Image (tube, helix red, strand yellow):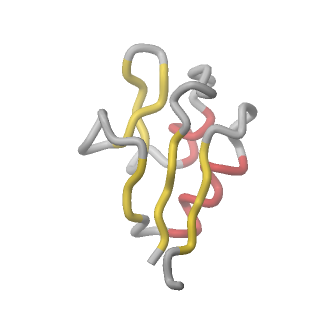
Amino acid sequence: MYKIVLDKKKCRGHTHCIKVAPDIWFLKNGKAAFVGDDKAISAPVEDIDLAKKSALVCPEYAIDILDERG
C-alpha cells in the first residue's frame, strides 16, 4: 500500500501534477488538491505509476509517495 502526501505549504500552483494526473489532482485556491477530498494532505494511491509521475514533475517537491507495506 502506498500513500501520496501533499505539502500544501510548498505548493505554488504550477499545475504540472494536474496535467500529468488529473484523476488525482485539481486546482483549488491556487494550489493542488486531491480529487474527492480537497482538504486532505494524504491519500491512498490507486495508480502508483501516475502518482510517481505527478511527484516527479512538481518543481517545488511538494508531493511525496510513502511506501506503507512495512
- Residue at (61% x, 20% y) in the render: 12
Give the residue at x 63% y 60%. 52
Quadrant location of residue 11? top right
Looking at the image, which residue sits at the far top? 29
Rendered view: 36 above or below 27:
below
Q: Residue furthest left?
A: 36
Determine the residue positioned at 54% across, 58% down: 51
Whole-percent x and y of residue 43? 38, 55
Seen in the image, is 45 located left or right of residue 59?
A: left
Would you say 33 lies left or right of 6 here? left
- Where 3 sits versus 61, above or below? below
Estimate the x, y position of residue 46 in percent, counting from the top left: 40, 69
Residue 1 percent across, percent down from the top left: 44, 78
State left or right for residue 4 relative to residue 42.
right
Residue under the image location 46 percent in, 68 percent down = 47
Q: Position of residue 29 (x, y in %)?
A: 39, 14
Quick one: 62 or 26, which is closer to the camera?
62
Numbered disc total: 0
Q: Which residue lies furthest to the front in this view?
A: 70
